[in-house]
Image (tube, rainbow, N blue to C red):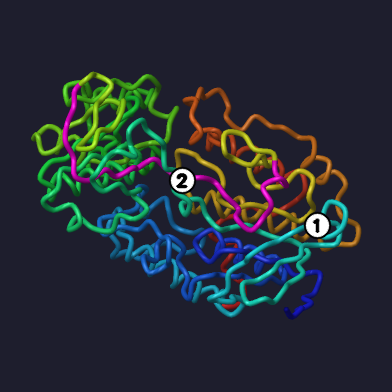
Amino acid sequence: MTETAHSAAHVGIVGGGPSGLIMARALRAAGIEYELIERHTELGGIWDPENPGSPMYESAHFISSKYTSYFYGYPMPEHYPDYPNHRQLHAYIRDFARTFGLRENIQFGVEVKHAKPLGNEAQDGWHVLLGTGETRTYKGLICANGVTWHPNMPDYPGLGLFKGEVLHTVSYRSAASLEGKRVLIVGAGNSGVDIACDAARSADSCVISLRRGYHFVPKHIFGVPTDVFLGGHVRLPKGVVIPDDPSKMLRALIGDLTRYGLPAPDHKVLESHPIMNTQILHYLAHGDLSAKGDVASFTPTGAIFADGTEEEFDLVLFATGYEYRVPYLDPELFKWKQGHPELYLNIFHRRLKGLAVLGFVEFASAGYQRFDEMAQMAAMDAYIAQSAEGCGEWTRMKAEDHPNLRGTTDYIDSPRHANYVDVAVYRRILSEIREKFGWPDPADALYQGIPGR
């Protein structure tokens, strides 16, 4: 084992996906030295299907539009469609890294095996052990490893008896694997619904099982991307009046979901993660796909549903989400709530100095500019950590401040929503903190002058 003693001012970033690269740019803009460690041989995180463990599949597209999803200061190319596919997203991420000169501080093909705080409450920094046997010492550690690497596999009665194929959607790649099969998809998140649409076209038959009712949001309203429309960036057609409540608008546009065999939603549209898919109702309406309630149990040849009906299947795909993990840190370092670490602003460890987690937050909004705003906070935290004086008020806030990030929204009670925030409330609170300490606001202009641009 060899020791590489890096400057105590250095920050270590783990992960070369979008959030890690956004973090690297924020540190560079703030003049803070960093090193990014990426276990794969290329950038992109989950958007690189060659990255071992990536859940990327052929039909995957962004669920938010290119108009709201770009990195600050770096719009997506004009020739991209409203909703880019995974290849276009991967190319965009790599071009972003080249444009801002981020590749030079990245160590590729190296896994972080373990990290631990040095000294009381990490006052002396962070010790990081790499898969090569080398070690690093950093003043701060940014965990940007993402949340879609560790599949959540549920345990249903009789599942072990089922003689067909059982997979999590993390292993799904293309509709070709569904041909000639009777497919059951358990779960109706965005990937589950996408794959159900693949199965409607390619499988012999397909059933999608939903534990509860959800709102299905079309990707376009009046011919423009839904996030652009809801953001008030377009003029309504003459004579069109849209209700203020998005749930009422959806009911007007979509109608009664129970007509498709779907359970009625038991919550308002913004009280759960939005399911952005235009095709799913098309296939249900044409009989190419059918919906069922929860699975009660499995049999050797299929499944029995909560309504007592039974069907036979060849393949069960669990679209049941992922576990939040920071695999190189001792879980005992965190307090956990429904599988999520409890963090100040869903970013900062409350006690351990210099530790931030980027991307462990859920909201009904495009992600990358929100990650930019979180990265800006983490960069300022790193700036404070490397200064001799520090900032007692900021340290106190991280330890004691408990702002309400959810506003008045009553999110559904599920592990997925344990860290959910109201994006307008969240952005307002971050803005108030930046104003309090005189930190710059993330915006397109902030990153125009950094080296490499």
Q: Residue at x 80, y 74 (%)?
A: 7
Examine the rendered structure and indicate whether residue 416 appears above or below residue 355.
above
Residue at point 85%, 43% (across, down): 393
Q: Residue at x 67, y 55 (%)?
A: 329
Please identify the quarter of the rendering in which residue 248 is found: top left
Q: Nearer the viewer, residue 253 or 272?
A: 272
Residue 112: give x, y in percent of width and height.
62, 66
The answer to which of 162 and 35 lies nearer the viewer is 162
Label 1–label 2 contact, CB within 8 A: no
Q: Position of residue 18 (x, y in %)?
A: 50, 61
Which corner quadrant holds the C terminus? bottom right
- Determine the residue located farthest toward the right in the rendered image: 389
Looking at the rendered structure, the number of numbered marks drawn on it comes to: 2
Q: Please provide the residue range marked out in magenta.
A: 309-334
Q: What residue does disc 1 label?
A: 384
The residue identified by callout 2 is 322
Q: Which mark is residue 110?
A: none
The residue depicted at 57 percent of the width and 49 percent of the height is 325
Q: Is residue 22 above or below residue 289?
A: below
Q: Nearer the viewer, residue 8 or 172?
A: 172
Residue 25 horizontal/vertical position (percent)? 60, 66
Is residue 279 rendered to the left or right of residue 294?
Answer: left
Q: Quadrant of residue 207?
A: top left
Would you say residue 64 is visible in this rendering?
yes
Q: Is residue 148 above or below residue 261?
A: below
Of circles 1 and 2, the one toward us is 2
Does residue 65 lie above or below 209 as drawn? Answer: below
